[in-house]
Image (cartoon, grey):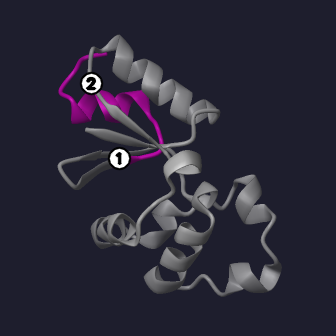
């Protein structure tokens, strides 16, 4: 299982803590250190709609020129942005064996994914 994000993101910290508390082993992929390859991002976009992967509330999105924001209209344009600015991706992204399990963090959703009661 792999968790994608950046280490100083509070939501990523919450997800990592939750996984550790439940003894769930996860490999952490730091976008800042390792970037993101196109094949991985395309696989995510085939499994969920692009708006779910783009964090429109974050500083990266808000810092984009208005014309650039308006140009993000489909998976192709979203992919280009995700590869250029990985910090625009909603975090964390939880993946197992290539399957996108969850975008963002929600304790209840994680509990359901892993069939846990807490």
Q: Which mark is residue 81?
A: none
Label 2 environment density (alpha carbons within 10 Å; few <14, some 14–19, many ≥20): few
Q: Position of residue 3 (x, y in %)?
A: 38, 40
In the rendered structure, does residue 65 fall within the stretch colored magenta?
no
Residue 65, above or below 118: below
Indicate left or right for 51 with 26 as reference. right
User: Image quarter for residue 85?
Assistant: bottom right
Q: Residues within 10 Å of mark 1 (few under 14, many from 20)?
A: some
In the rendered structure, the answer to whether residue 60 lies left or right of residue 4 reads right
| Residue shown at the point (54%, 78%) measured from the top left | 80
Say what secondary structure mark 2 lies in. loop
Mark 1 sits on what residue? 102
Please tell me whether residue 83 is drawn above or below residue 103 in the rendered image.
below
Foreground pick, 33 / 50? 33
**Residue 81 horizontal/vertical position (percent):** 59, 74
Q: Give the percent coordinates (x, y) of residue 105.
A: 46, 37
Residue at 62% across, 31% down? 10
In the rendered structure, the answer to whether residue 4 lies left or right of residue 89 reads left
- Is residue 115 inside the magenta stretch? yes
Residue with the mark numbered 2: 25
Q: Real-space Cα distance between discs 1 and 2?
A: 16 Å
Q: Which residues are magenta?
A: 102-118
* Residue at the image point whose x is 44% and y is 26% from the top: 16
The N terminus, quarter of image: top left
């Amino acid at each position: 299982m792999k968790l994608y994000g950046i280490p100083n993101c509070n939501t990523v910290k919450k997800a990592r803590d939750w996984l550790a508390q439940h003894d769930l082993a996860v490999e952490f992929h730091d976008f800042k250190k390792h970037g993101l390859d196109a094949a991985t991002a395309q696989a995510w976009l085939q499994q969920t709609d692009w708006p779910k992967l783009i964090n429109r509330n974050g500083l990266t999105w808000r810092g984009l020129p208005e014309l650039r924001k308006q140009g993000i209209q489909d998976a192709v344009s979203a992919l280009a942005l995700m590869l250029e600015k990985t910090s625009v991706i909603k975090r964390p992204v939880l993946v197992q064996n290539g399957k996108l399990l969850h975008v963002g963090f929600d304790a209840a959703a994680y509990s359901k994914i892993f069939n846990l009661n807490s």
